[in-house]
Amino acid sequence: FDDEDDSKGRADQGHELTAFKSPSAKTFKRWYDAYFGCDMDVMALLPRHHGPGPKLFTIKPVSIAFAHKCATGYLDRSRPTKADTYRVYLGEIQDHNKQQPAHLQVEKVSRKKFEAMIGNFDAFHVAASRFGEKYAVRKFMAIRRSFNVVAPGQRIEMDFVNVDLMSLLTETGIWNVLPSVIQDKIPRVRIYFGAAIDVATRKILAFKASLAPNGASAVATIRMIMSDKRHLSTYVGAQTPWIAKLRPRFITHDNGSEFISKVTQGVLRRGRINASRPAAGEPVCRPFIEKLFHTLGLLIAPYFDGRTFHNVVAKGDYDPQKHASLLVEELIKVFIFAICDIYHNKPHDGLGGNTPHNAWVEATQEYEIDYPPSPIEMLHIFGHKTKRRITPYG
């Protein structure tokens, strides 16, 4: 052997070696099969994970809220481009960070994610803000004429959307009006929002939320479609009553476990409701409920004073699970108010500038609807069958 480097040291001296953990038996078997399955090509062992990149909510919430506030600058009659709006955003970041200490400075959001925020804005609201309401009505009137669903209940779309609570508040602009003491106590939990929308009128027929959806959550959403909801609009102080209720003729939903469960399918059969679910992996056929939250958030932020969550965070001991449940309950009240008084009375891009409330009233007068079942039939549809032993007392 040739001693090329005497710096290796003596044999009785310690050396620092770089070692890698050995793979588990399952991982080794997967690598083994991939290697010999590709005729011993070492390229088969290379990692193929490209990843979606860092998610939006990995950035500080205050940075996302700052970006959302600047993104609303796109909604201006001067009609700036998305690139112009992003350049203004970068300039405002620099001005903001110069005046703030290091721990209060905001991070930059990439241009792609910034433009994604703009893309989530309501289409009619964007057109009306940039070109005027008359132009928006003319633009979307053609879209309204292209629909073949005209009667209420003819097609109802249901879905549960998994939303990160922190991202929901920041991306809708609600985070900007929350006091810092409340912002610090917002937990990182994921909420499942379930909703049902009538395609003909864009009227929201049901709105539910839960931390873990199941068949019972889907059944509760279906029951809400057929139930009177005026007490909910009164409870949240809305001026427009939530009058929409009917027996659905056709419901479309996705392949989620809460919809394909035996409990949910049994309710649909007993209620004589036709249902269909598109093939998995076809998002075009799925409902447009996720877009709803960005629409509601953009509209409700100016009316939101930040005191809604104050009673929740002001409660004594901090229990994360209970805290999250209370926040969801308060958030539901906010969204119900937004649905009744804002969304239902706002011109909709899918209705040619008409509002969902007016479209519902006009459609129910023009077309026959299937009225909700009687209380006895509702008990038959949604009741639980149980077995009981007969005793001398009955």
Image (cartoon, grey):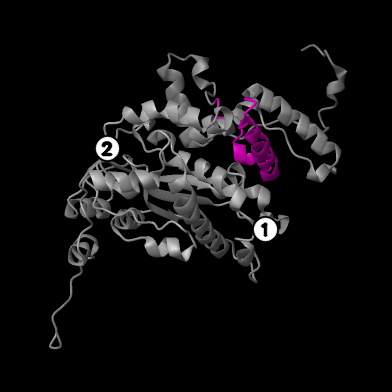
Taking the image as drawn, is residue 158 in sight?
no
* Residue position marked by numbered label 2 in the rendering: 150
Secondary structure state at the residue bearing disc 2: loop
Residue 4 in the image: state x and y as whole percent: 82, 12
**Location of residue 65 (image quadrant):** top right
Observer-nearest of 26 and 257: 257
Which corner quadrant holds the C terminus?
Answer: bottom left
* Residue position marked by numbered label 1 in the rendering: 182
Taking the image as drawn, is residue 179 in sight?
yes
Q: Nearer the N terminus, badge 1 or badge 2?
A: 2
Give the residues in magenta. 50-79
Work out how far the residue at label 1 is from the one at label 2, CA to CA, in angstroms: 44 Å
- The vertical placement of 102 against 2, above or below, is below
Residue 142 in the image: state x and y as whole percent: 37, 26
- Mark 2, residues whose alpha carbon is within 10 Å: few (<14), some, or many (≥20)? some
Q: Is residue 98 left or right of residue 284?
A: right
Q: Amino acid at mark 1?
A: Ile
Q: Amino acid at mark 2?
A: Val
- Is residue 346 covered in magenta? no
